[in-house]
Image (cartoon, helix red, strand yellow):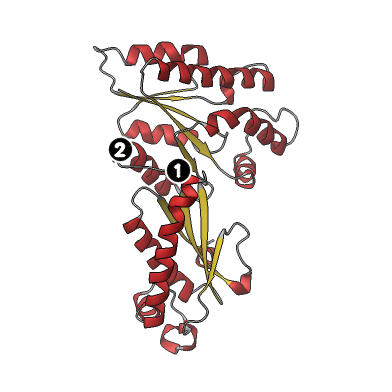
Amino acid sequence: MRLVIVTGMSGGGKTAAIRMLEDDGFYCVDNLPVSLIGKFAELVSMPDSEITRAAIGVDVRSGINGVKGAANALKEAASEIETLKSAGIPCEVLFMDAGDEVLIKRYKETRRVHPLSGDGRIEDGITREREILKELRKNADYIVDTSDLLTRDLRQEISRIFAEGGEYSSLMVTVLSFGFKFGIPSDADLVFDVRFLPNPFYIESLKHLTGEDEAVRDFVLENPVCEEFLEMLTRMLTFLLPNYRKEGKYRLVVAIGCTGGQHRSVAIASELCRRLKKQEKKTGFHLMHRELMKKTR
């Protein structure tokens, strides 16, 4: 029997994750009272139970009487999880998270009220919630940051963790192409400048294409200097990623920049992401092209 406790920040994607687990065959219960977690686990783990995989959604709504009630409920939930593990009942914790700015934006777009903000600011509610959830997050088996994930990317992550049965680490790597003329991404951890390569912009037949087009991709990647650069960069990152995981890092943004973010950086970011996925099976990868995304908005 496999039991998953799905928790995390409000607006971090917990509800979506539960729905995806349900699609994958899990019996799911959202917002179950904390006092019933142990009883539920006992029932589904009984030898004659027909349920072999279950998920329970737990968040700050599980408490009453505002911040104090939520804090007590989540503290009790952490205790219940430890009790289950001590009793030999397999129990995993999936923590759904996102950056504060992303959470604020999501709340403003949906016009919903944060459960801990009361009549105050959304930011205050998020700060209180992070404090309440810090122990659950610290001891989570899986942390999924949805800040840059599309629905299909999140589904791939959930499947990778719970359906495919392979190794998993909470490190999510975003490979991001960008243009230096529009500024270096503020959330970049590692930045690599590929403006040393010939620019397809100055070739009339390639000028109005992008690095997603085969002609541009071939022009960039078939350059021997580019191949040497990609080999060295891939080796360096495959060395760094395990060490980042050891230090508990769960989110890494690798930014690849050229002048306008249309040609070289796009082609190289795409190829780098492909190579890393092939070598780092248990790490999650997400490919983004910042300047191309602006065109579609």
Residue 276 percent coordinates (x, y): 37, 59
Q: Which mark is residue 210?
A: none
Observer-nearest of 27 and 223: 223
Location of the C terminus (image quadrant):
bottom right
Can you tell which of label 2 and label 1 is closer to the viewer? 1
The residue drawn where x is 46% and y is 80% is 208
User: Disc number at residue 163?
Assistant: 2
What kind of residue is marked 2?
A: Ala
Q: Residue at x 60, y 32 (%)?
A: 134
Marks 2 and 1 sit apart, C-alpha to C-alpha, by: 16 Å
Please tell me whether residue 228 is drawn above or below residue 137 in the rendered image: below
Q: Is residue 250 above or below residue 63?
A: below
Looking at marks 2 and 1 on the same chain, the residue that comes earlier in the sequence is marked by: 2
Q: Position of residue 48 (x, y in %)?
A: 24, 11
* Label 1: few (<14), some (14–19) or many (≥20) C-alpha neighbours in 10 Å: many
Cβ–Cβ below 8 Å for labels 2 and 1? no
Residue for badge 1: 170
Helix, strand or loop at mark 1: loop
Q: Is residue 115 visible?
A: yes
Is 227 displayed left or right of 164 in the figure?
right
Identify the residue at image location x=51%, y=24%. Answer: 58
Q: Is residue 51 left or right of residue 80?
A: left
Seen as rendered, the residue at the extreme right is 120
| Residue 157 locus on image (x, y percent) | 39, 44
Instruction: Tell me what residue is drawn at x 45 percent, y 54 percent.
Output: 241
Q: Label 1 sits on what residue type?
A: Ser
Vertical position of residue 49 compared to residue 7: above or below = above
> In which quadrant of the rendered image does the N terminus lie?
top left
Question: Does the rendering let one see residue 223?
Answer: no
Q: Is residue 161 left or right of residue 5?
A: left
